[in-house]
């Protein structure tokens, strides 16, 4: 108890907590977009339930991983190494290496899954006569729901490991990490339904979100191979794309209003 009071009285701990919450929220956007797209493929009465279960599983997984910090940190140790490496940079370090840890392998697997899923959904969206998939209305609701939860769980694992490793890199205090994770997941829970409804009500936003997932998958694969793309670049690109899409939506709404006004006259 005294140690918690000591932490609470330390301004540096509060600064670390706020910074970590912001970082976790930003990292959680990827997770939330994926959950929103998957849940929107379900029947309307099951969507909110799937989102709540998916985000709750993310919380359980993050807290479970936090309870095994030594194991998580050990995931960054190389498991095997291939004899090739990239050219040396100005500091004499190779641009990329092929030494793989369990974290790298999980990121590569998660990235490949995201690329596959986003590509499949894009194809399903643009195909004039799409084939039935596991989320098609002709399949049973139970199968739809179960498939969605399984896929959400798989990506929860990938994003949770990345999230916890970020937390470990920013603070040494376990209570701070736990509090940041709980607050972040609470924010995700509140934002899940509005975000999913917004994506569902704007078809062009669905394609934009799938494009984000495709990019995130490629970045995860690159990260697994030791090519680290600065997160700031990724989120700046996502923000700019969202801004352009927002302007397009504004333009379309203005055009509809003008068209409606001309019809009345």
Image (cartoon, helix red, strand yellow):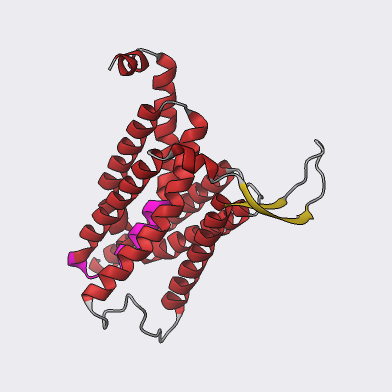
User: Image point 27% across, 62% down: which residue?
Assistant: 261
Q: Residue at x 35, y 48 (%)?
A: 61
Quadrant location of the C terminus in the rendered image: bottom left
- Residue 217 percent location from the top left of the image: 53, 59
Whole-percent x, y for residue 156 in the image: 39, 54
Q: Is residue 97 magenta?
A: no
Q: How many marks?
A: 0
Can I make out residue 37 in this image?
A: yes
Residue 100, x across and y down, in percent: 63, 53
Q: Residue at x 27, y 17 (%)?
A: 1
Q: Main secondary structure of the magenta part?
A: helix
> Residue at the left extreme?
45
Q: Is 102 positioned to the left or the right of 193 in the image?
A: right
Q: Is residue 183 above or below residue 240?
A: above
Q: Which residues fall within the magenta stretch?
A: 30-45
Q: Is 36 located above or below residue 76 in the figure?
A: below
Answer above or below: position of 16 versus 48.
Answer: above
Choose top left, top right, bottom left or bottom right for residue 184. top left
Please indicate, yes or no, whether residue 246 appears anywhere in the rendered image: no
| Picture quadrant where residue 22 is located | top left
The image position of residue 87, as x and y in percent, is: 82, 49
């Amino acid at each position: 108890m005294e140690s918690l009071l000591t932490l609470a009285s330390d301004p540096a701990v509060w600064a670390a907590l706020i910074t970590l919450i912001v970082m976790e929220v930003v990292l959680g956007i990827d997770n939330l977009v994926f959950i929103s797209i998957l849940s929107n493929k379900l029947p309307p009465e099951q969507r909110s339930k799937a989102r709540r279960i998916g985000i709750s599983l993310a919380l359980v997984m993050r807290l479970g991983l936090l309870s095994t910090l030594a194991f998580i940190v050990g995931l960054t140790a190389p498991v095997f190494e291939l004899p090739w490496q990239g050219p040396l940079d100005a500091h004499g370090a190779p641009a990329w290496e092929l030494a793989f840890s369990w974290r790298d392998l999980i990121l590569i697997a998660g990235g490949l899954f995201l690329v596959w899923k986003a590509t499949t959904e894009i194809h399903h969206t643009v195909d004039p006569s799409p084939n039935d998939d596991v989320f098609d209305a002709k399949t049973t609701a139970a199968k739809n729901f179960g498939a969605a939860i399984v896929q959400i769980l798989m990506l929860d694992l990938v994003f949770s490991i990345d999230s916890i490793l970020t937390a470990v890199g920013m603070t040494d205090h376990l209570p701070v990490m736990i509090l940041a994770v709980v607050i972040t997941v609470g924010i995700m829970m509140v934002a899940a339904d509005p975000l999913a409804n917004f994506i569902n009500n704007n078809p062009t936003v669905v394609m934009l979100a799938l494009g984000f997932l495709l990019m995130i998958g490629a970045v995860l694969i690159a990260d697994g191979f030791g090519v680290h793309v600065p997160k700031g670049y990724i989120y700046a690109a996502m923000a700019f794309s969202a801004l352009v899409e927002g302007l397009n939506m504004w333009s379309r709404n203005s055009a509809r209003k003008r068209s409606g006004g001309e019809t009345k006259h």
